[in-house]
Amino acid sequence: MFGYVIADRQQMSDKEKGEYRSYYCGLCKEIQRIAGLRGSAVLSYDCTFLYLLHSGLYEPENTVSMEKCSVHPFRKHRILRNQIADYAASMNILLGYYNLLDDYRDLHDLKKKALADYLGRYMDDIRARYPRQCEAVEKNIELITQAEIRHEENIDIAAGKTGQMLAEIFAMREDEWQNILRNMGFYLGKFVYVLDAYLDIEKDEKTGNYNPLIQKKKSDPKGFCDYIEMSLTSMMSETARSFEKLPIVEDAPILRNILYSGVWTSFRAHRYRYRKKLEEKKREEGFGSVQGARRTV
C-alpha cells in the first residue's frame, strides 16, 4: 500500500495512541524477526491497520513486553505481538518489496533497488507460506504495469487491479469472514490507488509520468476536486460498510478512526492547496484583465 491508511492522532485519546503505537512497534519487531533490522525500513501504517483489523476479528492471545529499539535506544516502549503478527509483517515485506521495485522503475533510485534486492532474499519463504496472496500481488502488479505502459485513461482499470490485490491480502484465511474481508480490501485498494494518483498529479504533469487523472483535470479543473472526493467517498463507504459487518470489539474505535478520518488526512490537505491555487490563479487573471483594460483605455 501507499502510506495513506493512517490514524488521525488528533482525534485519538492518549490510551488509543499508546495502543496504536504498540501494534506498530510489534509489527516492526516482527519484520525484523523475518528480514532483519534493515527490513524494517519498509514498515508501514497500512499494514499496522491490517494487523489491528485481523487481531480484532480473530482475537488471538497477545504478548506484551517493554523493549528498547534502534529508534528509541534510551527508553523502553510497549510492544504487542500475537499470531497475526507474522502475517501482517509478511504482507508488509511483500508489498514493500514491489513498491520499491516500482519506485526504482519510475525514479531510478539505486537505494530503492538495493533495498528491494535485500528483501528479495526473503520472498521465496513468504511465497511458500502465503502462495495465494503472493500470486495475487504479482499477477495484479503486472496488470497494473501493463495499463501504465499503454497509458490506460480509465482509472478504474488499474484501481480495480489494486483492489483485487488487496482483496486477497485482507482475506487472511478462507473462512466465514473471507468474503466480507475481500470486499473491504477491494474497495480500500481502489481508494488508495485513486488517492495516490490524485496526490501525484502535479508531479506527474511536470515529469510526464503516467497518471490517468491528468486528462480529467484538464477537462474540468474547477470540478476536479469534487469529482475525486465523490469517487473516494463512494469507495470508502463500501469499505466501511464491510468493516461494520465484522464482529470487532477490541480496538474498534482505533479502526474507525482510521477508516472515517485518518484515510482522508492527505486528501483534505491537498484539496485545500489545490483550491487555494485555483483562487490565486483566478485573482491573477482578473488583475491581468483589469490591467489590459486600462492599457486599452
Image: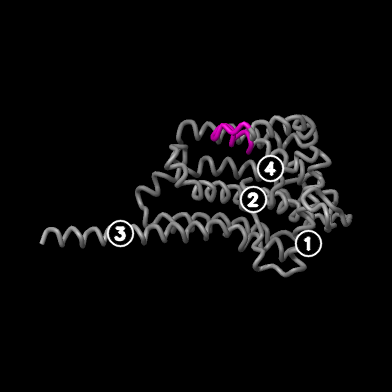
How many callouts does the rendering have? 4
* Residue type, label 2: Asn
Tell me what residue is drawn at x 64 percent, y 31 percent: 113
Q: Which residue is mark 1?
A: 19
Closer to viewer: mark 2 or mark 1: 1
Task: Kindly state the secondary structure of the residue where label 1 is placed.
Answer: helix
Q: Quadrant of the N terminus?
A: top right
Place residue 250 in its image quadrant.
bottom right
Task: Kindly state the secondary structure of the residue where label 2 is placed.
Answer: helix
Q: Which residue is mark 4?
A: 168
Q: Where is residue 91 drawn, in percent x and y?
A: 73, 42
Query: Magenta region: which residues?
Result: 99-110
Residue 106 highlighted magenta (yes or no): yes
Rendered position, 11 above or below 175: below
Q: CA distance from mark 2 to mark 3?
A: 46 Å
* Residue type, label 1: Glu
Q: Where is residue 243 drawn, in percent x and y?
A: 68, 58
By secondary structure, the bulk of the magenta-drawn segment is best described as helix
Place residue 75 in its image quadrant.
bottom right
Say if mark 1 contacts mark 4, CB within 8 Å.
no
Tell me what residue is drawn at x 62 percent, y 63 percent: 260
Q: Which residue is mark 2?
A: 183
Q: Which residue is mark 3?
A: 284
Q: CA distance from mark 4 to mark 3?
A: 49 Å
Position of residue 31 in the picture relative to residue 167 (left or right): right
Local crowd size for mark 3, using a 10 Å CA cut-off: few (<14), some (14–19), many (≥20): few
Q: Of callouts 2 and 3, which one flags the residue occurring earlier in the amino acid sequence?
A: 2
Place residue 286 in its image quadrant.
bottom left
Q: Where is residue 249 drawn, in percent x and y?
A: 77, 64
